[in-house]
Image: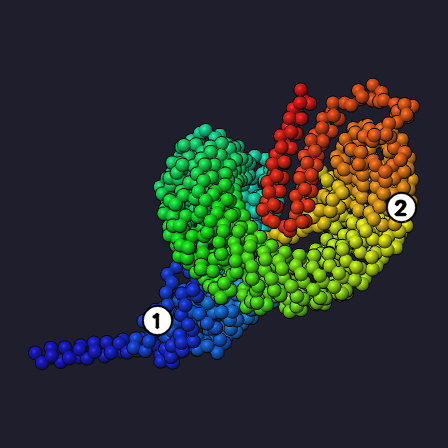
Amino acid sequence: MAWHLIFRLLCFHFFLHSTLRFASPLCPPDQRDALLHFKNSFMLDSKASYYCDGFQSYPKTNSWNKTMDCCSWDGVTCDGVTNNIISLDLTCSWLHGSLQSNSSLFLLRHLRSLNLGGNNFAGSHISPNLSAFAKLTHLNLSYSHFFGIVPSEISHLSKLVSLDLSNNYISDGHWLSYLRLENSIFTMLVHNLTTLRKLVLDEVNMSMVSPKSFANLSSSLKYLSICSCSLGGIFSDTIFRLPSLTSLNISENYDLSGILPKSNWTSPLESLSLKSTNFSGEIPDSIGNMKTLTTLDLSYCEFTGHIPSSMWDLNQLQVLSIAGNSFSGVVEFEKFTKLKNLQSLTVAQELNLIYDTLKYTFPKLETLMLYFCNLTKFPYFLNSLKRLRSLDLSSNRISGEIPMWFWGISCDTLEMLDLSSNLLKGGIQQLRWKNLQYISIENNSFHGPLPIPPPSTHSFIASDNGFTGEIPSLICQSSSLQQLKLSNNNLFGNIPSCFGNITNLKILDLSNNKLRGPLPRSLVKCVNLSTLVLEYNEFIDIFPHWLEAPQLYDLDLHSNKFYGKINLTAFGLFPALQSLSISNNNFIGQWPIGFFSNTSLVVIDLSNNKFGGPIPLPSPVTSYYSIASNNITGKIPSLICNAMHLMIIDLSNNSLTGNLPWCLTNFSTNLSVLNLRMNHLEGTIPQFFSSRSRLRTLDLSRNQFEGTLPQSLVKCRYLEILDLSHNQIEDTFPRWLGTLPELKVLVLRSNNLKGLLDIPKGIHLFPKLHILDLSNNSFSGLLPANLMMNLKGMMNVENVQNTTSYMTQDLRGGTYENSVVVMMKGLEVQLVRILTFLTIIDLSCNSFQGNIPEVIGHLHSLIGLNLSHNHLTGSIPSTLENLTNLEWLDLSSNNFSGLIPRKLGDLAFLGYLNLSKNQLTGQIPQYKQLSTFSSDSFDGNPGLCGTPLPKACPSNSQPPPPTPSSLLTFDREGHESWLKQKTLWIGYASGIIIGNSIAYIVFEIGRPKWLIQGVRILESKAIEWIKKTRRKAIKFHGQ
């Protein structure tokens, strides 16, 4: 019995000793204290883990305290034998603050795995002290706002198996700055990390890294992702021969080129993405040997040729995307049905398919993207797809109404539907998919009342249609809506007062409708609003200072009827605002000079209101700044030059006085437009323009500048438009401007310029000039024949026939439209947009002498020519008949003599002719276009006679009638060609007439956007009329 008792006591002693040993603290105190110090060096902020959507995000360090063994702390793992901390996983832990190089983190020398991904280290540099973790095998610093250069010490971590530095950048609210990896450091990394199996560097700036370095990657590498790294050059195909590689993603490196290997694909690849690279050539047949491929994304590359038949043997494929290439021929859609495991298919290639069949079967398909496939109907096989989650049929030619059967496809699973940019019409009664989250039906011809999206919808885009009526209040029941875009429809009435119930709304675009009334105050509940676009409506309200939208990024109210003073103290409610456009309203008051200085506004457009007072300075980060057409007074402060990011400055049509700050012409290499037209500025134009200038438009017209033209303008190699008209500049003709390679518009009208326009032969100047206006100066001598011989931009008739674009400046957030004032058909008009094919020469109101040079007949694309009010002599040259695109010709108030050339009647588009006040003689030819002008065109020529003048001609002065043969040689083919062109240009001419009338109004009363919008509607209708007329003409002559 005693023996048993002793045995039990021994067993208890052993158990107690063992229990106490394992119950003792496992975490060394110094490592515990290091973690606590690390914890206390950061704030906790849920926004720091913003990118962790889909991952569990919570503050793991909240559980850390001394009362618990640190080995049991959340995210901490200790070695079971030594008790040292070997793993720290703080993924998505809300950490916010700077990670210093002396952080206590680097005291944890035994770490084998460190994961700090999904936090915000506020632009910290990756510390070289990471090399202290000599045993580290796994390092993840992704999505954590690190910045700077990746330190070379990271290549010392020779035991690394997995390295992820992806998606690190910082933002100042406008520009992103990415983590950078130098070529030398990457070369060391590749050389030293010989056991690496996973490498992820997405969005790390590797622009300086040579693609050849990737050829030396470890043979043990299984996973490589270098998406969007700014890589350039030729990517070696040896990467496809790495023996262990299963996943390769080099997408979105737009300057990275390469070809796929034609043989020896030894990698056991399962996933390959080359999306948005410059990989080119044909897809080789050998791709069919990659039997393990489950994902293949070759979209938006430069592949050509036919899709190899071997691709259809990749029967393990689950994801296939081949959109955005230049494959030849038409793809047989039936081929894709061989890939029975497909879950996602993306194609943008003309397809050959049978529309009314169910034979195309895809048993596992969940995503189908068939855009730019030239489809004309809804394929009926869609009715057999029961698992679809995403369907994109956008940018096709599907016409007519949506068939009834389509509303039932994948009714229980469909989440995304895109039918945008087709030819669909009719009404939409109901969107029946109960799980639909995203729907886009924009850019079609749907009409009738606006359909109501299902309650599950996050994004509803119905812009650019013909929906009519009021916005139904039932839409307020779609409480999940985050994005609602209804622009460019015919909606009217008030915004429903219940809109505030859509509390998740982030983007609201109701622009270009006929909505009216005040804004519903219930919008104050939409606290998540980031974009509010209400332009081109009829809203009547005060500025919406009552909104409580701390995330509001873009506020666009322009071209409405908003009025009154703006409550500037309420502007603090929009701390995130980056774009403010309130132009073309009736706001009054004045802005404090420094009001915008502490904002983050990239776009400031206050134009066409009634603001007064001095210039409010833009923010240092502003790129678009317009206060045009207000009552702004005072001088332009030199402090405006502190806004180094400015691209557009428009201070035109105000009452600004004083001299120009000298810094204004060279303070920024970003400046593209400087418009100071119609002020009271004086003094000389600053003489220094930088050779680094990117200035494209300089308009200082209608001021009181004097002195000479600054010759440093010749450094502005990008300059396209120069308008210095209506000033007091005294100089000679600046032929040195002719060396500017992009100059298209040169307007020096109404200055004190004088001298000869003498251009030596053999000098090539003004190669792209389209508009030359030197009128109302004191130039003398002969008309500049050598100058005209240089105007290559006015000689190419294709410029006129094939171009319908405008001279604009594109920038972030919108487009700036250049304008110019010209004499057109006897009227001074402002062209609110400049057509790129508009070609004009105006040398009127000078003292030119002699004949019109014959070379003028080479300017085939010339549309307007004004040589009036000079001292020109001789006869009207017959070479003018070569100007077949001429629409107005003014030779009045000269000393021309002789007969009017009969061939001027062949100028079919000539809508304005003024030959008055000359010494012309003989009968006015009643021939074609010449017979359409009134007596005003010929008055003041004592020797002219005949219709339309009241003075009859002697009977013997009648010109002989045209011979019958000349009437009969008008062949049908030529007639048809002439009529087609005539039809086009009659439409254009009528558009110019409308434009002239409107432009005159614009010049008189400013630049109302509603008028511009009206002009665009007229333009589109005119184009459609022209097309219809052309079709009729072709049909008529083809019979």
Q: Position of residue 329 (x, y in %)?
A: 59, 35
User: Badge 2, how many Cα within 10 Å: few under 14, some, many 20+?
Assistant: many
Q: Residue furthest left?
A: 1
Marked residue nearer the N-terminal end (2 or 1): 1
Q: Residue furthest front?
A: 950
- Distance between the Cα atoms at labels 2 and 1? 91 Å
Q: Count of labels shown?
A: 2
User: Badge 1, how many Cα within 10 Å: few under 14, some, many 20+?
Assistant: few
Q: Which residue is mark 2?
A: 871
738, above or below 120, in the image? above
Q: Which residue is mark 1?
A: 62
Q: Position of residue 356 (x, y in %)?
A: 45, 29
- Which residue lies at the image location 68% right of the left edge and 45% below the top edge? 1000
Q: Amino acid at mark 2?
A: His
Q: Amino acid at mark 1?
A: Asn
**Is residue 1009 visible to us here?**
yes
533, above or below 938, in the image? below
> Taking 765 as reference, is 340 left or right?
left
